[in-house]
Amino acid sequence: MLLRKAQHALERLAVWLAVLGALIVLVQTIWISYGVFMRYVVGKPDGTVTEATALLLFPAALLGLAFALKEDAYPKVSFLLDALGPRGRRVMVSINLFLMIVVGIFFSIAGVEATLRAYASGTASEILLWPRYLFWLPGATALVVFTAYAFIRLLVELSSSNDRGD
């Protein structure tokens, strides 16, 4: 019961992170369109567009990780899963989740460490002079949530296997 509550909470958080990622993409789209308009129509390029939209790519790329896992939207080789029986499928799903956790832990550590280092050093972007940790923080958060969600999903998968007597 506790696992299911944790899973549900992380799924809601995954949706909110994905919404934040979608908003960032919307901001990037508007900002890039503005930059194109200023450069080619007005003839006065905006020097901040390239750096700002580039810095926003990192969080936008990671904020949907947990949501994609929630929606089972990652590509997979389904012919192998189809060839296996129910128990074999559960084993393969468990192995896949375990691998996601291992990779997620690695990138979570790297993301959190980068965020903390950027915060401690006080570094800022070159043109905008925005603190760099603000760009690392959403990505690091997304990685930690993804890893925690994959871990909970693995625990749920293993506990449901035990409940069925597999």
Image (spheres, helix red, strand yellow):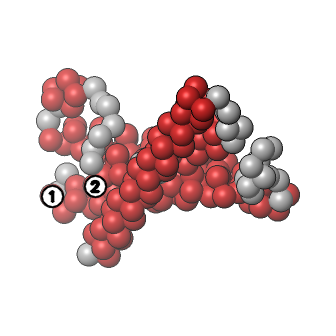
Answer whether labels 2 and 1 touch (C-beta < 8 Å): no
In screen coordinates, is 34 left or right of 68?
right
Residue drawn at the location 67% of the way across and 33% of the way down = 45
> What residue occupies the far front of the structure in this picture?
42
Classify mark 1: residues with Cα within 10 Å, few (<14), some (14-19) or many (20+): few
The residue indicated by pointer 1 is 164
**Which residue is nearer to you in this view: 101 or 57?**
57
In screen coordinates, is 82 left or right of 27?
left
Q: Is residue 150 visible?
A: no
Image quadrant containing the N terminus: bottom left
Amino acid tagged 1 = Arg
Q: Is residue 140 above or below residue 72?
A: below
**Which residue is nearer to you in this view: 165 or 70?**
70
Mark carried by residue 151: none
Residue 118, horizontal then vertical, whole percent:
77, 55
The residue indicated by pointer 2 is 157
Residue drawn at the location 34% of the way across and 47% of the way down = 69
First in residue order: circle 2 vs circle 1: 2
Residue 163 falls in image quadrant: bottom left
